[in-house]
Image: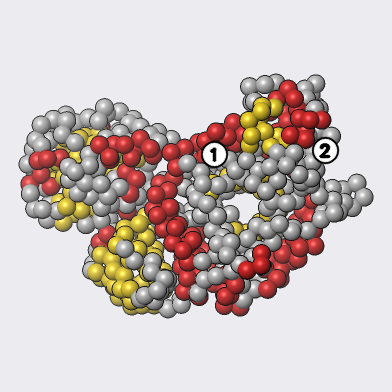
Amino acid sequence: MRSGIPRRARRLVAALAAGAAAVAVVLLPMPQAQAESNGVGATPALGWSSWSYVRHDPTAAVIDAQADAMKSSGLAAAGYQYVNIDDFWYQCPGSQGPAVDQYGRWATDATAFPASGSTNGIAVVASHVHADGLKFGIYVTPGISKQAVAENTPIQGTSYTADDIATTTSEKNYNCGGMVGIDYSKPGAQAFINSWANEFASWGVDYVKIDGVGTSDVGDVEAWSNALRQTDRPIHLELSNSLAIGSASTWAQYSNGWRTGGDVECYCGSNGSSFPLTDWGNIQKRFNEVAAWQPDGGPGAFNDYDSTEVGNGANDGLTAPERQSQLSLWSMAASPLILGTDLTHLDPTDLGYLKNKAVLAVDQDAIDASRIVDNGNQQVFTKTEPDGSVVIGLFNYSGSASQTVSINLADAGITGSTTATDLWSGSSIGTISGNYSVNLGPGAVQLLRTPPGTSTATEYVSAASGRCLDDPDSTTTPGTPQEVWDCHHGPNQEWTSSDGTLRELGLCLDAFNNGTATGTKVDLYTCNGQTNQQWTVHSNGTITGVQSGLCLDVTGGGDSANGTGVQLWTCNGDSNQKWTKA
């Protein structure tokens, strides 16, 4: 959950400077406060969901078997913990909407999930999942069923009824339909969602996915967030799907994660088969999503790139290198790894991929990587760990031809030479320096980690606010103005000194348009040797432009908010002109 200037405002600042200079810099997410005070979500969720493989036919027996397989396969020991039922757990008699209980909440399909005495069938499955040492998740969509409105069911614990809170606006329920909106200004509306959340908590639910939500459903998202919190049970809240990037701060405020795009499944199996689960084209779509959403994820609130379709060999719909690429991209992006495969028929090679501790650690560091190379079929993402180690993912985007993928290591904050380990093979690749290249087959990846302390870059921290000199939003638009933002060890905040310049990803800190007047904006530009890119870092903490003699200054001074711009100004000794190295 970021505070301060939202990313859409950061984008606008960059867009206004288009055509003025040149920049190619990246951003990693700040360590965020948890999105909700719900005790979950500090790291990306690991688990399994029924949709990709089971789809329309979940049953208690099927879910129990998947939970047992997660435990017996060693996936649970590796950290995978959620077993989630997606759609079709409730009764759907037709387009009039899901069948409801006496309080207007969805009624469990008792044929698929039979009760045990007075214990609801979903609670029975949750108990089985918990007995395996795992956590249990369930699925809802926004609004209230037309069935509840037609029956005018009472809202538990209140004098209100469904008709008191329902609107006539249709809400999304992809497979059953028959849902209408809730007017959350009406008495009883929050109580209805509370009663539903309380029921889930009584069943032992640990994870709730709300599907079909968008910007028009913020009221539902907020209501569910509040409802789950008041249960006093730690329950993860996930949003789906294709959420609006301009509302990222809202999704972060109320949930632990959100789907950035559409379904990863290809829906291309014959005769209704779930297999193949996906294809390389659906994985390719995520590269731009990962780059675009990178600034918005972090502890407590993660970008979700949909199910991880690795586990069933050829039935995944991906080649072995493509499966490694999906896991690598999701892990570089600190995405939830929610498996969509059949855990009862795991491919041994795939199982080894899923249990690779070094790769899982890349995901669980909760840091979103930045894309620093986007050259057609050459894609490189990188992130810097708090200990100064650097993780680099080199991807061949092409699914049909080999590619040589290259990176200037300085762009990842690495100067001089270092060693690196291939995280998939576990072997050392020896010493690397300068420009590093690797030839990759179609859809393949090389995932590298350097030793702690590799990053030689410096963060410049404003003495006034404690925030770092920062390039916003991984922007590559020429003339992107620089700003201050909460420090997070990202490459877009890491500067190296060379020949009097301050460089970030091979580009130079620059006084816009050779300006020497007070108030001149500071941007990034291709290094050109001009004096407007020369800087002197003084022992008193000031940084002055060689050409102008003016100080690097945070606009407005004081405890400047995230997104405050940086400019040149007459040196005056104020704290907004003092910088410390971190």
Q: Which residue is located at x 76 percent, y 63 percent? A: 62
Q: Which residue is located at x 58 percent, y 54 percent? A: 45
Asked which quadrant contains residue 573, the reply is: top left
- Element assignment for label 2: loop
Asked which quadrant contains residue 482, the reply is: top left
In this picture, residue 21 sits left or right of residue 108: left
> Is residue 3 something one can see in this rendering?
yes
In this picture, residue 267 sits left or right of residue 495: right
State the colouring used for the structure image.
secondary structure
Where in the figure is residue 206, as x and y percent of width and height?
A: 69, 48
Query: To which residue does mark 2 refer?
Result: 101
Query: To which residue does mark 1 refer?
Result: 214
In this picture, residue 567 sits left or right of residue 256: left
Tag 2 or tag 1, which sits nearer the N-term?
2
Q: CA distance from mark 1 to mark 2?
A: 27 Å
Where in the figure is residue 352, as x and y percent of width and height?
A: 57, 74
Where in the figure is residue 296, as x and y percent of width and height?
A: 44, 45
Q: Which residue is located at x 22 percent, y 42 percent? A: 18
Given the image, on which type of amino acid does mark 1 rest?
A: Gly
Few, some or many residues within 10 Å of mark 1 (<14, 14–19, 20+): some
The vertical placement of 430 against 532, above or below, is: below
